[in-house]
Amino acid sequence: MKARITVTLKNGVLDPQGKAIEHALSGLGFDGVGQVRQGKVFDIELTGTDKAKAETDLKAMCDKLLANTVIENYSVTLT
């Protein structure tokens, strides 16, 4: 079983890396780019077939290590 975890900053949290990317894109001539928000993606391969257990484990992984839940949101997708 495979999972994709997407972690993004919560609204209202400053994103200096996103701002730097936004500025760089403008400098490269890409007009019309509004706001850029940077995030991260984790692709995880799991053994087993119990989707409910996998979701529970993946959420625990996010809460304990992969996401800073004070300033970040995350979503889990199983495939």
Image: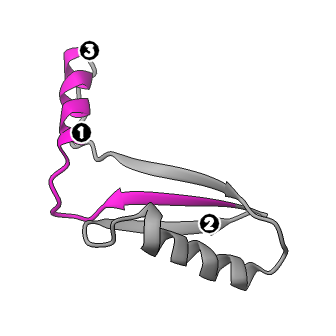
Q: Which residue is mark 3?
A: 28
Element assignment for label 1: helix
Residue 77: give its label: 2
Q: Earlier in the sequence, mark 2 or mark 1?
A: 1
Q: Earlier in the sequence, mark 2 or mark 3?
A: 3
Which circle marks residue 58 in the picture? none
Furthest-front residue in view? Answer: 64
Looking at the picture, which amino acid does disc 2 mark?
A: Thr
Identity of the residue drawn at 49% across and 58% down: 6
Place of residue 78 in the rendered image (x, y in percent of width and height, measured from the top left): 68, 67
Residue type highlighted by circle 1:
Gln
Judging by the rendered image, the residue that carries numbered circle 1 is 17
For the residue pair 41 and 22, the one nearer the viewer reads as: 41
Q: Residue at x 22, y 64 (%)?
A: 11
Q: Position of residue 55 (x, y in %)?
A: 64, 78
The amino acid on which the numbered mark 3 sits, given as a three-letter code, is: Leu
